[in-house]
Image (tube, rainbow, N blue to C red):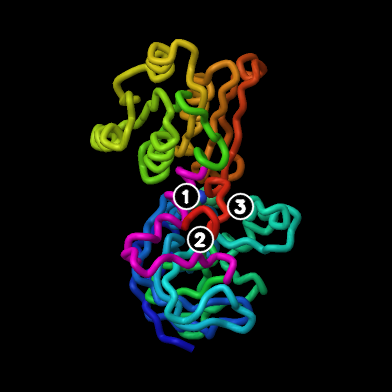
Amino acid sequence: TLNIKAATTFYKGSEFTISDVSLDKPKHGEVLVRISASGICHTDLRARDQLRPVPLPIILGHEGSGIVEEIGEGVSNVQPGDHVIMSFNSCGTCNDCLKAKPYACENFPHLNFSGKMKDGTYRHSIDNEPVNTFFGQSSFATYSIVSDRSIVKVDKEVPIELLGPLGCGIQTGSGTVMNKLKPDVGESIAIFGCGTVGLSALMAAKLLDCGEIIAIDVHENRLNLAKELGATHTINAKEVDVEERILEITKTGVDYAVDSSSVPEVLTQATNSLSQSGTVAAVGGAAIGTMAKVDMGKLLFERTITGVIEGNSIPQVFIP
Ligand code: CXF
Ligand code: ZN
C-alpha cells in the first residue's frame, strides 16, 4: 500500500478534509496515477451535498491529470511516466460500450457513483476502514487508481496541470455541440448557464461557425467572459424575459440550446425558446426524480429534448 493525502468528504455538506489515506496497489486493468492537478466540477459539489447520492466517506474529484506511476496486470495503453488525464469509467462489455457509446454504459452508475471499484472492492482506506471512490478516480488526492478505460494519454509538451477539466466539464460542453447537436454553419444556439460546461459549448459553437450564439446567465462577469469567447448576444436572466428576448433576436427561436444548469425552470425556458424543429440538450447533473414542465403542444412540432452525458465523447478519441 501507498500512503497518500486526500481531500476527504466525511458527511453531507462537509469541508474537504485533508486526510492520510492508504491506497492499495493497482489490480488487473488498473493504473496508479500521481496527480498533478484536479479540476472541480459541480457534480463534485452535488455529491458532497448529497444532491447526487453517493456513499460516504468518499474522496471526490473527477477531473484529474497526472503522471502514470505504476500499471496493473493486463494494462497496455499506458506506461509509467506517461502524462494522462482521467475521464469517466465504463465497462467495455455492455451493448452501449460495444456500440462505441461508453458515455451511455449500462454500468455507468455503478462504475462512477457506487463508491466501489468494478470488482466491488475498495482501494482506499483510513485506519483500515474503507473509503469510497468517486467517478472511478477520486482525484482530490495525491494519487488515484483508475481503470485503464478512464485513461487518456496526452502530449508531454502540454502543461499537464491545466488538462484535468477536459476529462469532464470541457468535453461535456464542447462534445454536446460537436458530437451530438452538430449545428450547420450559420445555425443559432442558446447556451443556458455559462460555467465551464456552457462556455465550452459556446467555444465549440463558435468554432463550428454558428450564427447567433446567445449566452444566458445571471452573473454579469460570466456573460462578459461569454462575449469574449464568441457570444453574439448575452442575456442576464435576472433582468430580462429570456424567452421573449431570444424570440426577438432569432425571430423563429433557436435551432439548438444547451442547458447546463440542471434547474427545471431553465429546461422549460430553453425548450420554449426552440425553433419549430429545434433541439435542446440537457447536460447538467440533475438527480433522478427531478421533474421539469414541458409544453407538449409545442414539443409536438418536431422539437427535441435530449439528455447528453459527457458530450457523447469517447474520451480517448475526442480529447486529443
Ligand atoms: C455528470 C452529471 C451526472 C451524471 C453523469 C455525468 N456529468 C459530469 O459531472
Ligand atoms: Zn463533472
Label 3 sits on residue: 103
- In this picture, residue 49 sits left or right of residue 302: left
Check disc 3 and give the amino acid type: Tyr
Point out residue 298 in the picture as x, y percentages from the top left corner: 61, 15
Residue 155 drawn in magenta: yes
Q: Residue furthest bottom?
A: 1
Magenta stretch in the rendered image: 148-175
**Distance of label 2 from label 1 (alpha carbons):** 9 Å
**Distance of label 1 from label 3 (alpha carbons):** 11 Å
Which quadrant holds residue 14? bottom left
Label 2 sits on residue: 87
Question: Camera-side residue: 86 or 130?
Answer: 86
Residue 153 drawn in magenta: yes
Mark 2 residue element: loop
Indicate whether 285 appears above or below 229. below
Residue 265 can be seen, yes or no:
no
Q: Are marks 2 and 1 in contact (CB under 8 Å)?
A: yes
